Image (cartoon, grey):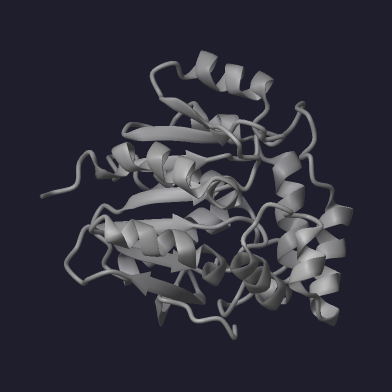
Amino acid sequence: MSTIDIAGESAFADANGLRHHVLRYGDTGDPDLLLLPGITSPAVTADFVAVRLAEWGFRVTVPDVRGRGDSDRGPSGGYRLTDYAADVAGLVEALDLASPAVIGHSMGARIAAAYAVLHAPGGHGPLVLVDPPTSGPGRDPYPTSRKAFLEQLREAQRGTTADEVRRFYPAWPERELRLRAEVLATCDETAVVETHAGFEREDFFEYWAKVTAPVALVRGGDSPVVPPRAAEELTRTRPEIPLLTVPGAGHMVPWDNPTGFLDAVRPHVTATRPE
């Protein structure tokens, strides 16, 4: 899939009627951590984050979410939060993940919240929701348009470069720009279009109202996806949940400020880890 060396071990698992590709990091027997990427982020794009999380003593699993990378495509109409959450539940069972900590970024944060509410209401491992889209019915639209997503996707399909990707992500390291340029075309157009529509039709706040501890929310200080007004509503509706802001980061928090992201996340995912 990529000409760039990836530290993760490739594996496949059958879950929720599809074959899923995952990358795995760390040692068997360590506490499990599941890292869920965003709308156009195949698993390899999270390699640099997964490596650091494994250094904390976790067995990290990063899936190609359905419709991305080497995982199966879902049917038309099969990219709802309920579909994604059922995939996560199936992977947890298929890979024998024991009450994993779950970190989700963007779309992955929405999926993580839906999984916790729909499939782990009796208890789950530490949950960290990173810059979840707060758009939805009656709310501001998602700040990146469908047209912009498709523009990037079609550039990748014809063969894009790190320099072209840099137009959208000017602060990223060269390696991460190259990775995205190489693997973005593995994202299925139907998956992207239907997921983007879900950002407008499905309300994250419905899951936010029901999610149970341990949970924290992390946002980029300059993120248009969780702007100050949405952050205020998140805190007002669930004041007991920590909401942490990473300075110098937009929506792509782990890429924009990796040190700030890791510093914000670490206390929450390691708090209940066995020594």
- Say which residue appears at 38% left-offset and 18% top-offset: 240
Task: Determine which quarter of the picture holds residue 214.
Answer: top left
Q: Is residue 86 left or right of residue 169?
A: left
Residue nearest the viewer, comparing 119 with 261: 261
- Say which residue appears at 82% left-offset and 64% top-offset: 152
- Say which residue appears at 33% left-offset and 42% top-offset: 266
Against 74, residue 238 (above or below) is: above
Q: Locate residue 69, reporting x and y percent.
A: 60, 75
Against 235, residue 134 (above or below) is: below
Against 77, residue 200 (above or below) is: above
Image quarter (top left, top right, bottom left or bottom right) of the N terminus: bottom right
Residue 33 visible to the viewer: yes
Q: Locate residue 215, reporting x and y percent.
A: 37, 34
Residue nearest the viewer, comparing 67 with 222: 222
Q: Locate residue 160, reporting x and y percent.
A: 80, 75
Residue nearest the viewer, comparing 173 with 82: 173
